[in-house]
Image (tube, rainbow, N blue to C red):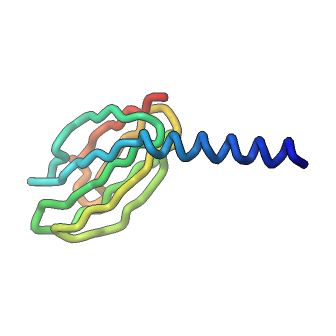
Amino acid sequence: MKHDIRLAFIFGLLLVSASLHAKDFEVSQKDKKFSRSTLTVKVGDAVSFKNEDAFAHNIFSLSDTKTFDLGSYPSGQAKKVVFDKPGMAEIECAIHPDMTMVVEVQK
C-alpha cells in the first residue's frame, strides 16, 4: 500500500512539474489567415486561437496528434488547445478552407 501511495505521489509531482514548464502561445486569425503558417511547441504547451476578424471562425484538427473542433466563435474571442502528445497537427478553419497551418509538437 505504501508503495502505491509513493508511486501516485511521484506521478503527481511529475504532472505538476510538467504543467509548471508548459508555455502558452497565441495564433491570431486575421484577413482569413492564421498569423503564422507553422508553430513548434512542446508536449503540454497550449495554443490560444484568437479571432481578430469581423466574422466567425471554426478552428479544428483531425490529426492523430491532436483531434479537436473549437466550434464557431466570433470576433474578439479566443479558444485554447493543449497539445498533449508529440507529432504534427494540421489546423484548419471549417468556414474558410484556405486557412491552414501546422503545429509541430515536440517531446
Residue that appears at 19% across and 46% down: 34
Instruction: Where is residue 7? Give x, y as percent.
Output: 76, 41
Query: Foreground residue, 96 or 78?
Result: 78
Is 29 left, or right, of 15 in this rendering? left
Instruction: Where is residue 75? Give x, y as percent.
Output: 16, 68
Query: Foreground residue, 42 or 50?
Result: 42
Is residue 34 visible in the rendered structure shown here?
Answer: yes
Instruction: Where is residue 81? Give x, y as percent.
Output: 40, 53
Query: Foreground residue, 49 or 7?
Result: 7
Residue that appears at 19% across and 61% down: 51
Depicted 50 relative to depicted 21: above or below = below
Is 7 left, or right, of 54 in this rendering? right
Quadrant of the rendered image containing residue 50: bottom left
Is residue 63 visible in the rendered structure shown here?
Answer: no
Residue that appears at 41% across and 42% down: 22
How many dots with numbers? 0
Instruction: Where is residue 78? Give x, y as percent.
Output: 26, 62
Q: Residue furthest right?
A: 1
Is 20 left, or right, of 34 in this rendering? right
Q: Residue furthest front?
A: 2
Residue that appears at 43% across and 49% down: 82
